[in-house]
Image: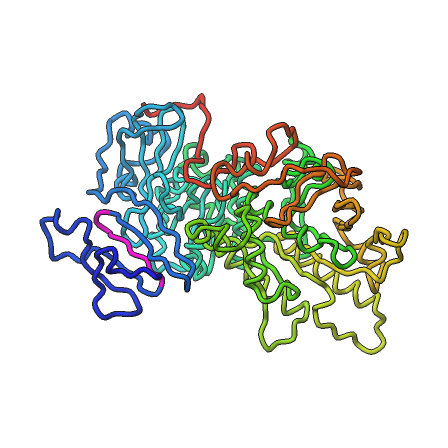
Amino acid sequence: MAEKFSDYGINVGARTTGQVKTFCPKCRDKRSNKADKSLSVNIAEGVWDCHYCGWTGVIRNENFVPKKTYARPPQRVNKTTLSDKVVKYFEGRKISQDTLTKLYVGEGKEWMPQTGKLENTIQWPYFRSGELINIKYRDARKNFKMYKDAELAFYNIDSLGKHDYCIITEGEMDALSYIEAGYTPVISVPNGGKSYDFIDSCYEDIDRMGKIYLATDNDKVGLEMRAELIRRFGAERCFLVTYPDGSKDGNEYLQKHGKNALALTIPDAQPVPIEGVLTFSDYEPQLDELYHNGLQRGATIGHEEFDKLISFLAGRLMIVTGIPGSGKSELIDEICVRLNMLHRWKVGYFSPENFPVEFHVSKLIEKITGARFSKQSLNESIYAAAKEYVADNFNFIFPKDESCTLDLVLDKARYLVRRKGIKVLVIDPYNRLEHHIKTGVNESTYISGQLDKMTAFAQREGVLLILMAHPRKMERDDMTEYKVPTLYDINGSANFFNKADYGLCVHRIRKQNLTQVHIQKVKFKHLGEPGVANFRYNLNNGRYVPAIDPGNPDERPIYDNANYLTGSIGERLVPKQQNLPIGKDLAVGAERNNDFLHGGISAEDTPF
């Protein structure tokens, strides 16, 4: 039965749509100003938020995906009184008390999980539309945290106002530095480039900017952040800020040369290089990173034997084949779900064979929750959480009344890169694209051109493009089993093998109840090597588990039925005995909460 706002004591009158302001039943009786309608209610989305006491909630019904709700720090009078020690600390970083006052930088006691006790902290308040939505805390040991379960957004997002440009930095201190240098529309990522989910909620604020100046650190994290912001907002309006003396960030440059010199780094910023033309300075930072840290493996998915053979990089083309019924699409979904949950790679699908989309989503929910998609196996609260998770992380391309050519699909995918931040694009299968081969062009040449378009899209937009393509009719090894196809067996052209960065074949041996994944091509040896990984398929939830004894058809595998939405994602998806070069998110458990901001102890001066 659908809930109503009145079930929570909320009175929206006769309104059935739109946004309304009304009295908050939680705090009205306790307030001196009982006439203040402090509760904002979005009737269409079924959510409410009190700007006074911070009470938020959502009504449940089967007709909409509930909007994510966040905790809010207590709304308070902005305290900007700072101790002399903290003021002197900022003065040492060339940040004036006037700038601190403008940004409401505060100081106070806060419990820090890294030390397990109350610490004196510097506090950076995050405002949006004039309301306090989050606070970042920093103690004397450079430990950081955000207000628990609060919304993430760009720091100082309200500063954009009516400006047509903005400066994006990697931290609050660098943002304060550019404000000190005289700039107003200056924002910072909230988490030091650890994830970018917050961009979705701030996209419109920045999308209207004519110029975006990227003032990131000149290290691996800074370069990755810069690349992601360019990918999301488009290279044509992004400008790269550099520091002539090689300073690592804006605050260091401010300390060395003063605010006038820092101010000049904005008009001196260079546009993102024109596509197809590279000078040495364009790739020098990446070359230096490669020199100092060597070739690094890509993202892995938490299946040990599989991970030994292959790791994934965005900007690559992966082609998957296999005879009908071998589990190709299920394996692609397994890879996508795990890349998303372990590395936050959002996914876009063009998958007409999984139409209608609700059928496909039901399979993804099974993989995410570990439960069969039914009311008996999946309770309503987990189902609601899974719907919210899918809405945030998986997107679908199904053009209506249009020719589904590759160009159209890639155009829709480009929108999903900008607006939703997808990092994986699945085209499943190739033969469901509509093809128009010009007279005089043979099929092999045409396919070569199509694959070139996919590769160029993957490299330009920074996505892993996964293409599923069927093989020609295969011969049987014996009366029951087919031969293992290769990418050379895909209908139409040997270029399916030649132009792939990764080549996989999914092959089911039915009499052994075994699914084999043949990694037939990994273009770069530091990312993997050819080989075979053996799996058993869990009929309950569509997940794959490694086969311990592949030759034994009676093996009783330990199936994974855990709910990935609870607990530590890294521990649930990656066996503890693994010793693989996994991503940073996995190494810390990749928990999806706001307590991921941990700093080390620095030898530099501290304010306490």
Which color scheme does this rendered protein use? rainbow
Who is closer to the viewer here, 290 or 112? 112
Q: Is residue 455 left or right of residue 253?
A: right
Question: How far from the left and from the top, in percent, is residue 71?
Answer: 32, 45
Name the residue: 41% across, 33% down: 255
Q: Say if 513 sits above or below 112 in the image.
A: below
Q: Is residue 371 left or right of residue 123?
A: right
Q: Quadrant of residue 492?
A: bottom right
Who is closer to the viewer here, 161 or 585? 585
Magenta region includes residue 51 = yes
Who is closer to the viewer here, 281 or 389? 389
Magenta residues?
A: 45-53
Question: How far from the left and from the top, in percent, is residue 105?
Answer: 29, 38
Q: Quadrant of residue 524?
A: top right
Question: How far from the left and from the top, in percent, is residue 138?
Answer: 36, 31
Question: Does the rendering let one see residue 183?
Answer: yes
Name the residue: 50% across, 36% down: 568
Question: Does the rendering let one see residue 257?
Answer: no
Q: Quadrant of the N terminus?
A: bottom left
Q: Quadrant of the C terminus?
A: top left
Q: Say if 111 sits above or below 418 in the image.
A: above
Name the residue: 58% across, 55% down: 363
